[in-house]
Structures are given as C-alpha cells and as structure tokens.
Amino acid sequence: MSAWQPTASLAALRLRAQLNRLFRDFFAARNVLEVETPVLSRAGNTEPNIASFALEFSGRSEGASRTRWLRTSPEFALKRLLAAGVGDCYELGRVFRDGEAGGRHNPEFTMLEWYRVGWEHLRLLDETVTLVRAALALVGRDATTCTVTFRDLYWQHLQLDPLTADNGTLRNALGDVNIDPTGLNRDDWLDLLMTHRLQPSFARDQLLAVHDWPASQAALARIRNDDPPVAERFELYLGPLELANGYHELGDANEQRARFVRDGQVRAARGLPAVPMDITLLAALPHMPACAGVALGVDRLLMALLDTPQIAKALAFDFSQA
C-alpha cells in the first residue's frame, strides 16, 4: 500500500456512511435532537486515566486563559444544553485523547453520545442494545444479549467479590499476568482483571451488558446506597470490544466538584499535569433534569461490523497515515 492511500477499504467507508445514516434515522424516529457542541474548551477532562490534548490560542481571549483543551467527550457541553431545556439530544462527532494509538486506539475518533430525560441507566441500556443490534443487521449479523452486575461477573468468572476483595486477592487473580504493582490501587487491579482476564473470554456474538459498578468508579454517575454502594453505570461489550459506557447522571454539583477535586489529587500524586475543572458544568448541574446518558465508540462498532481487530481498517486514515 502506498503512503498516500487510505487505511480503510472503500467498502468500509461506505459502511461508515450507512452507519451514520442509521444513527440519524434511529434518533429522528424517537424525536431525539441532533446538536453540535465545541471541540475546544477552557476546561479539560480531570479523569486521571484519560490524557487530554491542549493547545495555545494566539488571538484575543478577552482575559481568559489562552490554553484550550480538545474534548475527550462532548458530555459537559451536552449537559449544559440539557440544563437549558433542550430535551433528549445526541451528538455524533470527533473526540480526542492523547497517548492512545495502537491496534484498537486512535488519538482522534468518533463518538456517539446521547441523553434521555427522565430515564435511568437500565432503560438506556436497553435502547443502546437495540441500536447496536440494528447496526449489526447492516452486515447480516445479530448477537445474543446477556445482562449481569459487575459483582456477579467477577464472582462467576474469578470467584471473588470485586466490591470487597483486598488488593492482594485482586492481584493474585491475575495469575501469570505480570504487572508492575508500583502505584496501583484497587480500581487499577479491577481494571486489569477486566482487560486481561475477563474481556478476552467474552463470546464474539454476545452483547454483554455489565451494570452497577463499584462506587469508586462512578465517574459522573449517581451512586446508589446499596451495601456496599454501587454506581448506576453500565458498560456494553460486543465480544472483547468495549462499545459503550452509560450513566444514570449525577446532578449534584457539590458532589461533582468533590469528584473533580479528588481527580486532581490523584493526578498530582501520579505526577500528571493539572487540568482545569469545568466550572460551567458545575453551574449548570443544579438546572439539569434527571436523565441518563451514554457514549458509544463508533469506530469500535465499525470494527465489529467489519470483523477486524485493527481500528486502522475502520478509519479513512489512521494516526500513522494522517
């Protein structure tokens, strides 16, 4: 292949166009409004495991910081629109994450994110499954669906309770997977068990919906006061590919601020750059209606439709050819 040629086939490009059309038809039929929000922001993503791109604006900034951040998700802006009364909405667009390039990752990729007012996470999970199955039908495929709690998934496959097990138990469950333990906390061990022990065994033609995650992994989800508490969050997998991450959205600005502060403390402890929290989101949250939201990785879904483990084959030009 010559250096100028696309990394995706022409058939893959046509399939992407079909998929985009399916998304728009799906939401138009359900009266969910398509919107566009800024790609550049004065605030970044404070999440310690996500790295944001930053750039310097050279024009007039009216006293504001010249540093702007490329969005890792349209989430914060969409929630501001929800607070303003836009109602059910979605955005299909590019997002950016630094340091993520490889077989399944590209630093810029396409995300479909949508919100449903008055819904909770399990109802939105059902809609997400319906959309993914409609996408699979484009290539004559379907998938069975299995729904399980995070706790039950780990118990069934690893015979441990992920909500109460100590770090030593979690580390031992990795078996012969050798990981440097320096600086790792229990959430890191849980993530490693998911990626190294659980995901590789997920059935190719099964949509696995994992819900009610540890409260420590709530991100922007509500926490339900079970014993122990759990985050009202789900992730959807097709085979080993993680496709979507959804929440029953947190509307408490004080709690969200506290989570941003904790993120900053973790970043500082790891020697990561500080990222400004989004104060406009905090101002909007008290006005946001109760809702559920989900982000779906379009390139990952297209990889599944193309039956390829290489994200380059789902992109016109991947990072190495851009």
Image: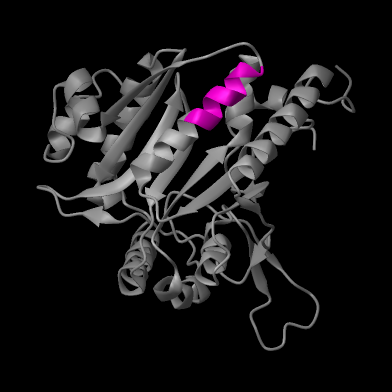
Q: Nearer the viewer, residue 88 or 145?
A: 88
Corner quadrant of residue 213: top left
Looking at the rendered image, the quarter that the N terminus falls into is top right
Q: Is residue 163 above or below residue 11?
A: below
Q: Position of residue 92 (x, y in %)?
A: 66, 46
Question: Residue lying furthest bottom in this view?
Answer: 63
Q: Position of residue 287 (x, y in %)?
A: 44, 74
Q: Do we see residue 7 in this rendering?
A: no
Q: Nearer the viewer, residue 286 or 167?
A: 286
Residue in the image at 9% along x and 47% along y: 227
Q: Which region is colored magenta?
A: 130-138
| Magenta stretch secondary structure, dominant | helix
Q: Position of residue 257 (x, y in %)?
A: 36, 71
Q: Is residue 119 above or below residue 38?
A: above
Residue in the image at 25% along x and 33% along y: 149
Q: Is residue 77 above or below residue 177?
A: below
Q: Is residue 143 left or right of residue 13?
A: left
Corner quadrant of residue 125: top left
